Image (cartoon, rainbow, N blue to C red):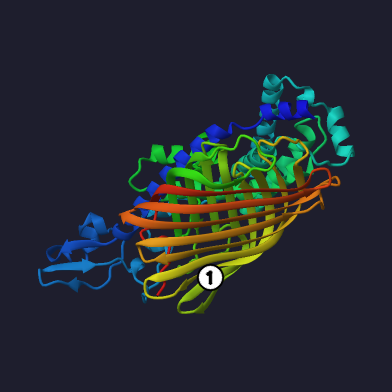
Amino acid sequence: MRRKHERKAKRALPSRRVGSALLGAAVALVSTMARGAVTAESANIDVIPSAVLGDDTGARDPRTQGLKWSPDLQWPSGHSLRIPKSMLAQTNEPETRASASPASASVPEFGARKSYSIPALEILGFDVLLNRYNKRFSGSSDYDVSMSSIRYNLRHGWVTDNDPFSVNQFAHPYQGSMYHGFARSAGLTYWESAGYTFAGSAAWEIAGEKTRPSRNDQVASGIAGSFLGEALFRMSSLVLEQGDGVPRIWREVAAAAISPSTGFNRLAFGDRFDPIFSSRGAAHYSHIQVGWSGARHNVQGTSTGVKRNELLADFAMQYGLPGKPGYEYTRPFDYFAFHATASSANVFENIQTRGLLIGKAFDESHDYRGVWGLYGTYDYISPQTYRMSSTALSFGSTAQWWLSQNIALQGTALAGVGYAGVGTLHGTSDRDYNYGVAPQALLATRLIFGDRASLDLTGREYFVNRIGSGDAGGHDNISRADLTLTVRVHKRHSIAAKYLWNRRAASYSDLGDKTQARATLSIFYSYIGSERFGAVDWR
């Protein structure tokens, strides 16, 4: 078993490089969205001297070509303000495609030239190259795949393996996100791409290795891979869509760093896959943080090598925040939240994403709006003492409530069930590792005080039992809560203080009852992507 762990560890993705690339791309994502928000607010309003105004203004002034204008708003200075009708809340003449400029009308929509064969061949080629790479550099016979080994895997049942945790619970979902990105960037819908991801994972399990196919790997690559891959694809597309002011080459580089398979298709197929997936004007909030964290409470249990202090880099985004007039939740992940924290102690402290798969918006009152439905979630949590990963489906809701003129409360509440793995980090026992069905719940809130500050409180609970573990197993109860206060200092520059608490209570027949806990206090410099900390004002 130990030799198998070593062999598979050699084929693990270079998580440090992946982490650096993702965090670097996060900087570009926040900055381009910030510029895009300012440009979107100002680009279509212009003040024109009254001397050049008239019925043929659009023909005489190149700044106004192709736009339908509102009546003049006259100023005493002799100047007039005209606003394009497309920006007005109400108009007697609906906008149509005919009113768009010829240049914009000629741009094809995303998916207009989609391909089913290209991503299928890309996924097959990716698996072949990965198999050949592992065979060449791992020195293991596990990759000596033949028709005989494929037939054997097809005829025998699936198993649960205990390969290195980072391979199973991070590398496999990331591999699945590559499959999803190949299909998504080729113009396929979410559900079509999810099918490609699941099929690509199954193909790897059966024909990528000689070892028996693993059910936990199939969940991680085939299902979590789509949840992670869609979030990465959406953020990559947002960089390309809202990168006003940033040279295109850097936007392409940042987008490729976030979703490499998307970048590959844009580079390899040029104009065919050049159209950008539209966010449809989704309201979003993001921040990127760097800071220091120190432990205030430690119960290591069987974990060794715990570091008291660590440096952290943190990125978070919420996309499709409810309440924006006209925004509809018709596509999977039209609302999603993504959060990742890199640590000097153990590479990744967490990677978490949740997205609305099927849902419906609601409008209960003038001050309260939201969306409810079925969410897909992928969580990877590793606070030095233990590590836990879950892929789940949950029912719940995301909403915003205006408590007063300037104070808003946002929140998400979910309850569901998933398949999870949990084990000790730097443990002294190889047996302290468990897979199982995991009922779970989430409550996340953000209290927003205008454009000055926000207070975030998030709580999570997981119960990983022995059902689906493949052996007698045991059970684990995971609790995690954090409280963060962020105060804006100047423009989008802020400071944040965060208290994070984690606890694991485990019970195994051969280990007895074990408890691990860790609490930390962190101080961050934070660059936020919205002046109002993500509050959506529809009033």
**Up/down of 180 relative to 483, above or below:** above
Residue 383 vs residue 252, the one in the foreground: 383
Q: Position of residue 539 (x, y in %)?
A: 40, 75
Quarter residue 139 falls in? top right
Q: Quadrant of residue 437?
A: bottom right
Spot occupied by residue 273 in the image (x, y as percentages of width and height): 52, 43
Q: Residue at x 48, y 44 (%)?
A: 293
Instruction: Note whether residue 250 is visible.
Output: yes
383 is higher (above) or lower (below) than 414? above
The percent position of residue 252, horizontal first and vertical second, equals 44, 39
Near mark 1 (Cα within 10 A), the count class, few <14, some 14-19 or many ≥20, is many
Give the farthest residue toward the right.
155
For this view, does 482 lie left or right of residue 416? left
Q: Nearer the viewer, residue 66 or 455?
A: 455
- Percent coordinates x, y for residue 295 in the rendering: 53, 45
- Say what amino acid the circle numbered 1 marks: Gly
Query: Left or right: 278 with respect to 84?
Result: right
Q: In this rendering, would 140 be left or right of 496?
A: right
Q: Which residue is mark 1?
A: 370
Instruction: Work out whether 469 lies above or below 155.
Output: below
